[in-house]
Image: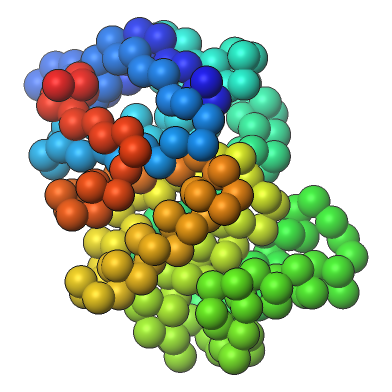
Amino acid sequence: MIIQIKNLTKTYHRHDGAINAVDNLSLDIPRGAFVTITGASGSGKTTLLLMMGGLLRFTSGQMIYNDREINLRDEDELASFRSNHVGFVMQSFALVPYLTAVENIMLALNVKCSDKSKNRKRAIELLDWVGLDDRTTHYPKELSAGQQQRVAIARALANNPELLLADEPTGNLDPSLSEEILSILKEINQKHNTTIIMVTHSPKAADHGSLQIKLLKGKII
């Protein structure tokens, strides 16, 4: 198993009381799986995804990654976990608007390597892999939504993550572009044995998963 989650709970305290966005949830994720998580709005999908990526701290429970417990309360350990093991793809693309496609990818690479020439070469290779070798110097506003999401995927792969987390990666795309992005994710999963965990509201997108999970009120149903 690449991830083991045991009795994970995330509680938010509001003026009208406490809400468990994720409620005593346990889950084992096999290495190389393509996991899809569905559920109604407010079911805890994104909260669970963010905790698995070390972007959100849990209230109680345990997360084990590669047989080693991750301390989600230690910010240095979380930062190391994210930079060394995890790639993120978001619905909003989250590209820096004043950087070109290749510069957006180099931004992720610069965290680990200061060799700009080497980083640029790697970034161009990734853009070529997602079919955007002719868009290296384009800014996000000069790219279509599907192209922006491809850049975001290329950036997520910059440091060869073992785990790729995608939050509604096709949410802003039309059906044909959605299929293109899902095909890229499936290729990443199958060719590189990258474990992918994808939150989606689309039943069609969820069908791509080798492990399909549905949440209701923070629990697996």
Q: Quadrant of residue 56?
A: top left
Residue 36 horizontal/vertical position (percent): 30, 40
Viewer-side residue, 70 vs 179:
179
| Left or right of 87 on screen, residue 200 | left
Q: Residue furthest front?
A: 191
Q: Is residue 102 visible to us here?
A: yes
Residue at x 21%, y 21% (from the top left corner): 220
The quadrant of the image that shows the C terminus is: top left
Q: Quadrant of residue 106?
A: bottom right
Q: Residue 129, relative to residue 15: is it above or below?
A: below
Toward which corner of the image does residue 131 lie, by quadrant?
bottom right
Query: Is residue 4 positioned above or below 40 on the image?
Result: above
* 22 with respect to 191 (left or right): left
Q: What residue is shown at x 57% (from left), y 65% (from top)? A: 154
Question: In this figure, which colouring scheme has been used for the structure?
Answer: rainbow
- The residue located at (68%, 64%) in the rendering is 107
Residue 189 rendering spot, x and y as whole percentages: 50, 49
Residue 197, percent from left and from top = 40, 40
Rendered position, 45 above or below 5: below
Q: Viewed as shown, does residue 116 lie left or right of 93?
A: right
**Above or below — where is 81 with respect to 104?**
above
Q: Nearer the viewer, residue 18 or 65?
A: 65
